[in-house]
């Protein structure tokens, strides 16, 4: 019996995802990946200088490095990548299902990204999420930044420690979190209430913050799915924050410190 087209496409997508690899670069990103036991490491290319700086991490990982000439660095990176003489081919991390990282967390805070595609922004958001103890950062499988070397370098090691999930449908993920008791707040500059007003007396609740791409902001469906829309209280009409800065400020504001 011939399989339905959607079944074939799903199997092909799963196979492609399983075959996908990522090239991380830069001393910090490579060191953290080498030290992460959950990261599948495939190929390490380093210059002699980088090998010396990463000696302990390389020894602990058990991977055999390939030594490259600094003038002919062989890793398949974009020409503008500042690799510092180190590149590591890896498999993307698998953080599991939404409920596995969002239920029972010490600090039940989640960031959801609505079509935030810039890897530098997502990397910076991962850093902030790690600093403030967020349970997870959640994007979508399409129209969001995947794991890349640029994202990992901007995340400055947070990619190896901070759960970063990509879901099929953001609205479905929001409803799932609401089912777990999360208060879901969408950031919108035109909202009537501030974050502090929305979470007053509720900082002990699980809270999820939804941020949209710079310019378009949140999609209408996303807004409709959130429990409430909130804004960051600003001192004046001087424009708006970069999405990664907004994520850090908003996350801090929910902690009730």
Image (cartoon, rainbow, N blue to C red):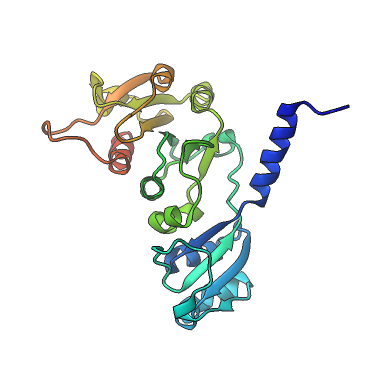
Image quarter of residue 156: bottom left
List x then y, in percent, for residue 70: 45, 79
Residue 59 in the image: above or below residue 105: below
Q: Position of residue 91 (x, y in %)?
A: 61, 55
In front of the other: 227 or 242: 242
Up-down relation of residue 230 to residue 104 (above or below): above
Quarter of the picture holding the N terminus: top right
The residue located at (59%, 59%) in the rendering is: 90
In the image, residue 70 above or below residue 11? below
Horizontally, residue 169 falls left or right of residue 188, namely right
Residue occupying image coordinates x 29% and y 38%: 246
At 12% from the left and 31% from the top, the residue drawn is 237
Q: Residue furthest left?
A: 236
Residue drawn at 60 percent across, 37 percent down: 97
As displayed, is residue 35 above or below residue 56? above
Q: Residue 74, image x and y in percent? A: 53, 72
Residue at the far top in the pictured view: 224
Q: For this rendering, which residue is in front, 152 or 4?
A: 4
Q: Is residue 140 left or right of residue 2?
A: left
Residue 49 location, quadrant: bottom left
Taking the image as drawn, is residue 50 in sight? Answer: no
- Give percent across and percent down for residue 40: 63, 59
Numbered label tally:
0
């Amino acid at each position: 019996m011939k399989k339905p087209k959607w079944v074939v496409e799903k199997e092909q997508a799963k196979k492609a995802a399983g075959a996908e690899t990522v090239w991380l670069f830069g001393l910090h990103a490579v060191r953290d990946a080498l030290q992460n036991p959950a990261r599948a490491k495939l190929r390490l290319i380093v210059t002699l200088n980088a090998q010396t700086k990463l000696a302990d991490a390389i020894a602990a990982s058990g991977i055999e490095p390939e030594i490259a000439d600094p003038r002919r660095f062989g890793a398949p990176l974009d020409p503008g990548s500042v690799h510092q003489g180190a590149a590591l081919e890896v498999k993307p991390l698998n953080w599991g299902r939404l409920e596995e990282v969002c239920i029972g967390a010490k600090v039940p805070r989640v960031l959801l990204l609505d079509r935030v595609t810039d890897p530098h922004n997502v990397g910076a958001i991962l850093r902030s999420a790690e600093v403030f103890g967020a349970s997870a950062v959640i994007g979508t499988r399409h129209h969001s930044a995947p794991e890349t070397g640029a994202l990992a370098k901007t995340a400055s090691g947070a990619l190896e420690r901070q759960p970063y999930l990509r879901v099929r449908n953001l609205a479905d993920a929001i409803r799932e979190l609401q089912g777990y008791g999360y208060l879901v707040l969408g950031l919108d500059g035109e909202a009537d209430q501030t974050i502090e007003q929305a979470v007053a007396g509720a900082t002990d609740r699980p809270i999820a913050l939804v941020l949209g791409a710079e310019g378009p902001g949140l999609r209408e469906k996303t807004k409709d799915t959130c429990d409430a829309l909130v804004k960051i209280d600003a001192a004046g009409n001087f424009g708006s924050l970069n999405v990664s800065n907004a994520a850090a400020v908003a996350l801090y504001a929910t902690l009730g410190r």
